[in-house]
Amino acid sequence: MNKKIKRILDKKNKSKIICLTAYSKNIAAILDKHCDLILVGDSLGSVLYDFKSTKEVSLDTMINHSKSVRFGVKRSLMVVDMPYNTYRNNKEALRNAKLVMKKTKCDAVKLEGGKKIISIVRTLIKNKIPVMGHLGILPQTEKKFFFKGKKIFEINKLLKDSKLLEKAGIFSIVLECVETKLAKKITEQLKIPTIGIGSSAYCDGQVLVTDDLIGLGKSKFRFVKKYANINQIINSAVKKYKVEVLKKKFPKSKHSFVTR
């Protein structure tokens, strides 16, 4: 077993797991100092490309961003989202997951879904490709954004799916916008860690989109908390640069090359 994956598993019931998204080397290098797990999420579709949904994200796009992230990740576990329509059957999933692992040198891949993808999950794990699960709101296939676990059939399905995924061999599972009491129950019943996003503090860890956390994005989701306003800092720096160039204060001699 990958030592980094074992480290994540060992945190169950002991210490909260810190997870954030990264789409480039520079951000990844900063996160790597603080995170246990760095996710190259297909959320990059809306964050970087203004796509209406993650369905528009291609495999090549995920691979290219993941290759950049890999340069910045030394300590954390690196997980890459398998994009929409890249794991519709066992053969396709195995081919694409192998490609992702080979080209990005990531530690694991993440797939959305429960019972419908169990055979695919088993196939990947059998071929030594570690898998992270994802239940609750599934951005790749969701039509409407409502939290899960209010209705009885949703509760039963999520409980069953989480156990099926665990039995299939996943090492952790993201719970997105799962009702608090249900998230707590799933976390208590599973031996593997749960990573929550909008699913309460009862999960074994938390994940957010980094651009939202630092105030670079414009997300208005209830579960997002902004810890900084990088947008403001960048704006201030660029404004100062503009003023200095216009007033001929930059560049000075120390920023230039002079023959003596």
Image (spheres, rainbow, N blue to C red):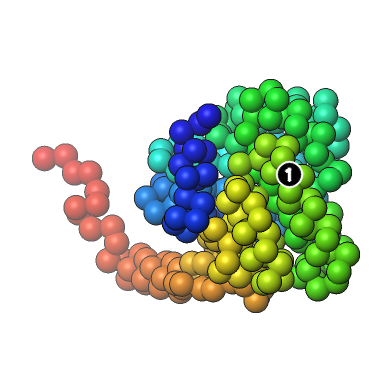
Q: Residue at 53% x, 58% y: name it.
A: 205
Which image quarter: residue 86?
top right
Left or right of 241 on screen, residue 188: right
Q: Nearer the viewer, residue 112 or 14?
A: 14
Q: Which residue is mark 1?
A: 165
Q: Residue at 22% x, 44% y: name it.
A: 257
Q: Nearer the viewer, residue 112 or 22?
A: 112
Above or below, 89 relative to 110: above
Q: Residue at 44% x, 72% y: name it.
A: 228
The type of residue carrying mark 1 is Leu
Above or below, 259 relative to 192: above
Q: Position of residue 202 (x, y in %)?
A: 58, 66
Residue 231 visible from this viewpoint: no
Q: Position of residue 232 (x, y in %)?
A: 45, 74
Q: Nearer the viewer, residue 202 or 35?
A: 202
Quarter placement of the C terminus: top left
Residue 93 visible from this viewpoint: yes
Residue reaching furthest to the left = 260
